Amino acid sequence: MSEKLEKQSISQFSEKAYLDYSMYVILDRALPHIGDGLKPVQRRIIYAMSELGLSAAAKYKKSARTVGDVIGKFHPHGDSAAYEAMVLLSQSFTTRYPLIDGQGNWGSLDDPKSFAAMRYTECRLSPYAKSLLEELGQGTVDWTSNFDGTLLEPSVLPARLPNLLLNGATGIAVGMATDIPPHNLNEVVKACIKILEEPKVSLEDLYKIIPGPDYPTEAEIISPEEELREIYSIGRGSIKMRATYEVEDGEIVILALPHQTSSSKILEQIASQMEAKKLPMIIDLRDESDEESPTRLVLVPKSNRVDKEAVMNHLFATTDLQKNYRVNMNLIGLNGKPQTRDIKLVLKEWLSFRTQTVTRRLQYRLDWVLDRLHILEGLLVVFINIDEVISIIRNEDEPKKVLQKKFKLSVIQVDAILEIRLRQLAKLEEIKIKEEQGSLDSERKDLEKLLGSKARLKTLIKKELKDDAEVYGDERNSPIVYREEATAFDETELISSDPVTVILSERGWVRAAKGHDIEPESLNYREGDTFFASAKGRNNQNAVFLDSKGKAYTLPCHSLPSARSQGEPLSGRLNAESGETFAGVISGPIESQVVLATSSGYGFVANLGDLQTKNKSGKAALKVQEGAQVLIPRAVENEKDVLAAITNQGRMLVFPLTELPQLARGKGNKIIGIPKASFESGEDSLQEVAVLGEGRELRLLSGKRHFTIKSKDLENFVGNRGRRGNFLPKGFRKVDGIEVIGSDKSNNKEEN
């Protein structure tokens, strides 16, 4: 007979299998239950420890013993996963109200995962864990079978306090996650009591009671008030925490770090900035943390003039001294479904859970009291008719049935009578039974009143919350303080403004020398190389390089190699086109101006800031006519300066610099008249331009000779822009180089 096979498409099977897996992860692994705020592994650890008798008053036992019970009886997963969950429940710097009291190495604030193996550590439950377990055996919760059906475990613990909000929770499921921050016990209890007294209380009123989370660390919560209100109103958002510090004897001492932040990581982040010279105002860094001061990081400023607040603002912006924490109050509610809730809904639903728990506890106790009164009623029959009862027991074959029929007793009562010992038949026992009966009858009336009145039930819940708050409550750890947004230092603010001279060689090698009194031509150059151009600037400014195609490139002056070496090739720093050479360098403030010109006789004035770019491939600046060459850029000192233009035929024209246009890029206007045919044939071209201020003189270099044109003699060459200019003195019409004498800025090519 052929077997019956069930056929199913792969898509249907995969969909069902993945959904089943997703629901398992969501409900049985990653998300906490609103009742006790625990995930299954945490609940099983606490229950297993209670079954082992590891109360807060018990002796410590090896952690391996607990882990063995957890994974062997309730949680069939890896021992390392169960042990790590135990560790997190014990760390006071991780869990706001620890559930486990550990002895041994359970990790440190600096390295939470540095805990010893479970064979070395010992543990027991903390006093706070009693609030989760105290009512467990009082009929308060449902019980389910463990993974192999041999034992029962609680589906949820009967928490007397809203542990979900007190300790928070984190978890990643399939398609959803949870991030619930911890809160202060006293504040949460007050909010619960407020809801019990005023069920329609507004979120605004609750916010006055619970202003924000309360983490295990004493770092500040700096989120604005409106952001915290929004988190509590929609159940989602993010919280900012910032380290706290003090200034002691001129040193910055960090005293508290954001939640789950490692001090070793902070030290590493700060040290890396110091090595990268991004914190020149800090000269030393120390870790003085010890048992008395778990966090004490010391920063030593360079001098007392250092703005310590600015330094810390920079570190807040660039290190984990300030961190953001996501909030997503996604949890499994009383209906067994995951949902994101606002703070009021969380508290109201937990109070519903607490009301159900207390009701079940009271009903369980009432049922026990009624059963006991029923038994006591039967026991009194014995003492009223003691001789007859003894006779029936001695003489009858089935005394149970006879007693039940004779005195109209229930099976339970008869069983209790038959279990009485002879020594309990004394007159004193009858008195005790009547006293117990009176006491239980009074308790029965109280229980029935509580169960029959919602108001009395609320009062009881409020009283128990207040009592627990007195036992477990404490002051707030994390102060809520509004702070301005932290900003990092601008890179230029971190760099000294020392004067430097940027030196460019003929072959495109660059370096920077400290100071402005450098003689670049006297430096050592590579074999076959020589000085080409220089620019005076400052260490916190940029150097702009112009190539033979008119493109401008930018490099920070402080990043250039020292002049003690022979420098580095610009081609290694910049993505210039193959075969292109560099025509000059300029440096200074971004608002400073520079003259750009080509040998075709055209040029313009540009702001240095317009030429700068972060793109290593440069930016187009000067349009170069075919066959033309880019001349060395010249710095402008004053808008009243004049421009001297010299051609290779020995003509020179001087005119006010204001006649040249100011452009960001382009070809510019004609500087000096050069016939088109002469330029194209190579007979005539613009060879040099120089910017001359008031009182400046121009020195012409021709071979080994030089000739200085005094400022008053420059008038012989003054003309309108675009004119041909006048000839230079005979013998100096072949100009090899120029120098501006008396100028504070030198961007000149010394030799051509």
Image (cartoon, rainbow, N blue to C red):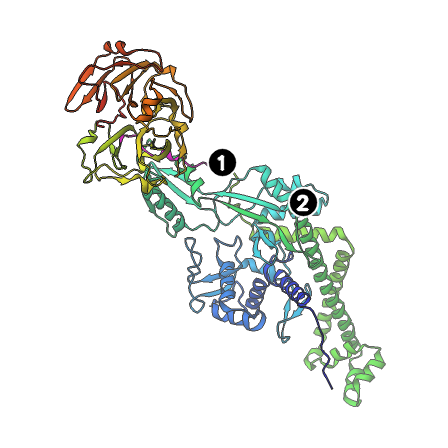
Residue on which disc 2 sits: 194
Quarter of the figure with residue 363: bottom right
Looking at the image, residue 237 sits to the left or right of residue 408; the answer is left
Residue on which disc 1 sits: 485
Report the amino acid beneath label 2: Lys
Q: Quadrant of the N terminus?
A: bottom right
Residue 146: say if magenta: no
Q: Magenta span: helix, strand or loop, mainly?
A: loop
Quarter of the figure with residue 143: bottom right
Q: Which residues are magenta?
A: 483-502
Whether 451 is drawn above or below 648: the answer is: below
Of the two numbered discs 2 and 1 in the rendering, the one whose residue sits closer to the viewer: 1
Whether 709 is drawn above or below 242: the answer is: above
Q: Position of residue 493 (x, y in %)?
A: 37, 32
Report the amino acid beneath label 1: Glu
Residue 382 visible from this viewpoint: no
Residue found at x 45% / y 50%: 261
Residue farthest along the left direction in this orientation: 704
Residue 501: say if magenta: yes
| Mark nearer the N terminus (2 vs 1) | 2
Looking at the image, residue 406 sits to the left or right of residue 547; the answer is right
